[in-house]
Amino acid sequence: MSEAPLRRLRGHRATATCCIASNDRPGLVATSGEDGCVCWFDMRCKDVVSIMEVGKEPISSICFKPGNEDVIYISSGKEIKSFDVHQAASSKPLGSYSYNKEEINQVSCSPKASFLAAADDGGDVKIIDIHNNCLYKTLRSGHTSICSSVQFLPWRPWEVITGGLDSKLIMWDFSRGRPIKVLDFDIPDNNPSSNTGQCFNPAFIHAIAVPEVNMLDKLGQICVVARGDGIVHVIDIESEKAKNSSKSGKRIQTRSKGVRAACDMDNQKQTGRKRLYLDYTVGGHSAAVSCVAFSQFGEKGRFIVSGGNDKCIKLWNWSRVPDAGETGSSNNDILYLNINLSKKVNWLCTTPSETENLIVCDTSKVVKVYNVALSAS
């Protein structure tokens, strides 16, 4: 459906690039922009609460410090800065880190707030020891192009997962600085969509989402990948790592009333999990997917929310995808909501609130707020 935003948040002087919502303070939202500023909004207020002047370079990524949302980390150019939220108006950083040699695309903080990870244009990922204020490790020679995204795995304290514009998803042991598993979506075995008429863009990885610690019991050890070929790809990480190099498992594809999923039979027997491809056959994106997130509203993680260059946002009730051999689910059950926008999506996030719970940064300087109303089912 085409829906007008519930609210428009104004404060940036240039394109908004990223947004995050506080879990500790419902209604508090931070957005970043190409103007080098971070804007703070309180959904209870009409106007921007404060504007933090970080620098002259565009801000690529922001994240809260887990367990202490009084601290925010901001990447701009080749540098990461940390700020005290309560001193936002002063624009004086608590600290800064300048270990990356190329521009940073995403900064992420580990669940226990011990490490930062910064993915850059050179394909490297810098792991920074927050407590000792030093570079811990450089993850290199994994990506052959831009490393666009990085996330810590909350169930593996010494592992991160990265994605890049080389179409590779890499799982790392950052204590050793070595890859554990590499999935190359340019290889047909890892990309069954390549012959199904999906959009012609390469399967570049633009964003990765992993469940928060409080979602793991229900969602499992998974990640969601936003791909350049328009696919929202759900992957069971531990199953992928367990696969042997001989690929002895028999691969099948299943369709149930238009629902498309691919699974590895041996791994499905072991874990009950499979790879899921939320693509055009189930009402998916017709252009590159730029961002993905797990929903914070209602039952946490019930929905995957994706935004793309097709100027669409889609809410996926992904738990309704049937297992192999099952029937009874249709495309309408899985694609819960489609919102048509007027511009491409840069980033999005959700809030725990019942209303004003979807925040969208598109290619304009105005941040949009939408309301996702949940049904009882």
Image (cartoon, grey):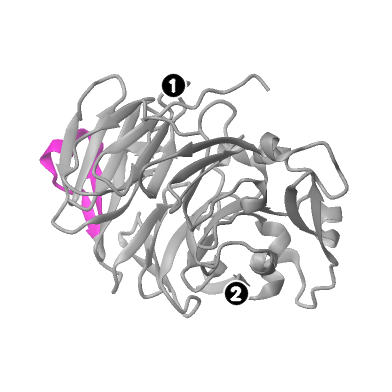
Q: Is residue 224 left or right of residue 192?
A: left
- Answer above or below: position of 346 versus 27: below
Spot occupied by residue 55 in the image (x, y as percentages of width and height): 14, 54
Q: Which residues are magenta?
A: 81-96
Q: Which residue is mark 2?
A: 186
Q: Amino acid at mark 2?
A: Asp
Spot occupied by residue 56 in the image (x, y as percentages of width and height): 13, 57
Question: Tag 1, which secondary structure?
Answer: loop
User: Marks 1 and 2: CB-CB under 8 Å?
Assistant: no
Q: Is residue 31 left or right of residue 268?
A: left
Front position in the image: 29 or 159: 29
Q: Determine the residue positioned at 70% across, 66% down.
A: 192
Report the number of discs. 2
Q: Amino acid at mark 1?
A: Thr
Q: Which residue is mark 1?
A: 355
Distance CA(mark 1)–CA(mark 2): 40 Å
Q: Determine the residue positioned at 35% across, 55% down.
A: 130
Front position in the image: 296 or 99: 296
- Answer above or below: position of 213 versus 290: above
